[in-house]
Amino acid sequence: MAFSAPSSPSSPSPSPSSSPRIRVGSAPDSWGVWFPDDPRQVPWERFLDEVAEAGYEWIELGPYGYLPSDPGRLMDETARRGLRVSAGTVFTGLHHGPAVWDATWEHVAAIAELTRATGAEHLVVIPAFWRDDKTGEVREDRTLTAAQWRDLTSLTERLGREVRERYGLRIVVHPHADTHIDTARNVTRFLDATDPAAVSLCLDTGHYAYCGGDSVELIETYGERIGYLHLKQVDPRVLADVMARELPFGPAVARGVMCEPPTGVPALEPVLAAAGRLGVDLFAIVEQDMYPCEPDRPLPIARRTRRFLRGCGV
């Protein structure tokens, strides 16, 4: 089944007369949502109400099953709040090789179908964690073998091509703490081994800083590969303690390692300036990991963050 991406109101593609721009949005993550269903998370209706109230127009779908998975209902709920969808999110473990392809595609296809139905054009791909996000239990070696790197890169290329052909979506791979695509060395190794026509990058400024990377340098060096942004900052003092204790990402978030802009690193103004110099349309989605958090905490932060980003010119 072949599919050509339709023109839609939510497309970030510029018209001949328009200038490239950065479109800012937010995500369930910034409301402490990590799972489809969890009693410590705000109801999805409250998230939608508050993200619109905070001044955002664009959202991501978050964990599949948190927002309504019926396309008609989802579109009704977002449209009546003046919201549009920028991307869906999938989780993959493609370094495990061809044996996991069928299960991976089943997971991806359901989310890609919903993402396409919203008019979005991006699918954020997060690689598998090498240790448990909650318990810290080590699931596998944190360093891939050469064969695993080949499986990861070749199957990610296949995923990008098939998602594009079947659903008209562009995959953007998200470097993430506690995964095999994390540090600058691993990110550049991944980019150098994958086809730019099939695979782009979702640069998460917080995760990249968490793992020691420089977002501005990455944008300036691999600008043609940057297809999407997540705006996030880390608290360097908390991060130093996390690294000293070798804590997994989940407990690190609970300690407040991801902080409210502009109190952390990296500075977002030069990141946005570097992204702007690329001369292409980009989404920049705010994601301040806060799971778990008190239900009244996210909205004031979201309002302040949106005001801060307006001051950055986006």
Image (cartoon, rainbow, N blue to C red):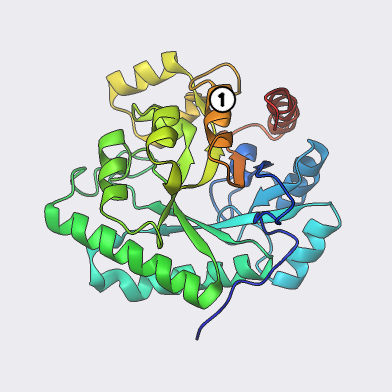
Residue 226 percent coordinates (x, y): 47, 45
Name the residue rendered at 39%, 29% in the picture: 217
89 in relation to 212, above or below: below
Residue farthest toward the top in the current orientation of the protein: 237
Q: Is residue 41 left or right of residue 111?
A: right
Q: Is residue 288 left or right of residue 214?
A: right
The amino acid type of the residue labelled 1 equals Leu
For disc 1, the neighbor class at 10 Å (few under 14, some 14 to 19, many from 20) is many
Indicate the quadrant where residue 9 lies.
bottom right
Residue 260 percent coordinates (x, y): 60, 23
Q: Is residue 260 left or right of residue 155?
A: right
Residue 261 percent coordinates (x, y): 61, 22
Residue 57 percent coordinates (x, y): 76, 46
Name the residue rendered at 56%, 25% in the picture: 268
84 in relation to 178, above or below: below
Q: Is residue 187 visible?
A: yes
Give the camera-side residue of 248 and 121.
121
Q: Which residue is mark 1?
A: 268
